[in-house]
Every structure is written in structure tokens, then in C-alpha cells.
Amino acid sequence: MRYTVALGDAITEVPLFGATVRDVCAALEGGAKRALRLAAEGTSDIMGHYPKGLEQGARWTLQGVEHRPTTLVLDAVPVHQVIHDHTIVADVPASATAISLFADGLHDALTGDTNSELVDQGMIKSFLGLESIVERVGAVAIRNSREDAPTLRLTKDDFDIIRTFDVSKPVARRVRVAGVLDVIKHSDGAFLIELASGRTLRGQFAERDAAPLTEYWGKVV
């Protein structure tokens, strides 16, 4: 899917220094990774290594540069076409790319959609990563080839809106985790999962009867 990132206004040619291209690409690369992780796992928080299963889906390529206005042309493949294990991206729309998830989340932040499942605190940090670029070139406009996708035009005033976006009351999200089922309490259905990082996650079986979990004790779930 084709995306364009226009720098400056419709008639101004922005001098395209290497640092500007580098910073735009870095902001989009980090934002796309976070956006895909949020859509797939319920959190964009990137601690330690990025999940290997999502790496391919987060990639995109810089195809070239157009002029008047200075525009970077990007290409990204829908996540479901490059991640063959669809179970890890089951909650990601079939036509979505990591870039479109980032752009849709940015749109939700700009419009104050606090019910969005594409915005959390990590994504806010990613969106604010574009601020220094906007200060340098005046404006940034992101558009993709999807007909119903709005053009997202960012100016310096928009970052005040993003900063005040309320993520203190997140909507309920399904979160996908994996680890070793370490403890099962049959009295109340509680259990512990030990994650690869060494941290433990507490949970409670919805039915309160933990008997169905017994066969998975000591195994990766």
C-alpha cells in the first residue's frame, strides 16, 4: 500500500537534508512498531526485544521522493500478507499495515477519540516524536492510498491536542501474552504466568474453577 509524507505546504519546496529524512523515517519506524504491537498485543510498550513474530509486519520501505511539496513515498504490505501465523495478529484488520495503524491512531488522538484502541501512552510518545520535524519544516501531511483515509496534516498547534489526550482511563482491550503457567490456585481460580523476561503475571480464570488449566501447568501457554 502506498503512503506519502509531505513536508511543508503545497507549494513550498523544503530543502531535504539527510537529517530530515533520517528523522522522519525514524519517527515512522518507531511509531509503526508500536502501533502494530498495540493492535496485536494490547500494549505499545516496547521493553527489551521487539516480538520476532511481529517484526516482518512492522516493516515498510522508502520508495522515493517527489517534489512540490517535498514528499516521501512509502510502501507497506498488509500485516496479514507477511505474518503467516495469523493467530498472533488475529485482532489486526486484514487490510491494515503498521503504517496505517499508526496513522489511524494519530487521527484518533487528534480528534479526541478516547474510545480508540489504537492509542495508549506509548503511542502518544510516538506521535510527539514528529513535533521537532514539524518545527523544522512547518507542517507534515500523511496520506495513504485507501480511499476512506483522511489526510492527516500536522502543524505545531496540533501537538498541544495530542499532549492533552486522556489515556488515564484506557478502554478494555484484549491482551495477548505468553509464558510458563507456574501456579494454579484451585480455591479461587487464580494463576501465575512467568514471562520470558522473568516477570510474573497474575490472572484469574473466568469460571473460577481452575481444573481445566491443570493439564497446562509447567507449559508455555
Image (spheres, rainbow, N blue to C red):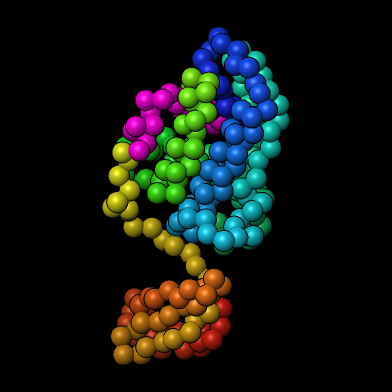
- Residue name at image x 49 percent, y 81 percent: 181
Report x, y in % for residue 9.
51, 15
Total marks drawn?
0
Q: In this view, does 139 lie to the left or right of 76?
A: left
At a point 52% along the width and 56% down the height, the residue shown is: 46
Does residue 49 lie above or below 20 as drawn?
A: below
Q: Quadrant of residue 65?
A: top right
The residue at the far right in this view is 63
* Image position of 216 with respect to 134: above or below: below
Residue plotted at (43% across, 80% down): 192
Indicate the position of residue 16 as horizontal and vertical percent values: 65, 21
**Front residue of this view, candidates 156 and 57:** 156
- The N terminus sits in image quarter: top right
Residue farthest along the top direction in this orientation: 11
Q: Depth check: give the residue in front, 59 or 30.
A: 30
Q: Is residue 157 visible?
A: yes
Q: Which residue is drawn at 59% across and 57% down?
A: 50
Q: Is residue 40 visible?
A: no
Q: Does the magenta stretch include residue 159?
A: yes
Is 54 a magenta residue? Answer: no
Q: Magenta segment range?
A: 143-163
Work out whether 159 lies above or below 38: above
Q: Where is residue 6 in the image (x, y as percent from the top left)?
A: 56, 22
- Please state the horizontal and vertical placement of residue 121, each as a whole percent of the image: 40, 49
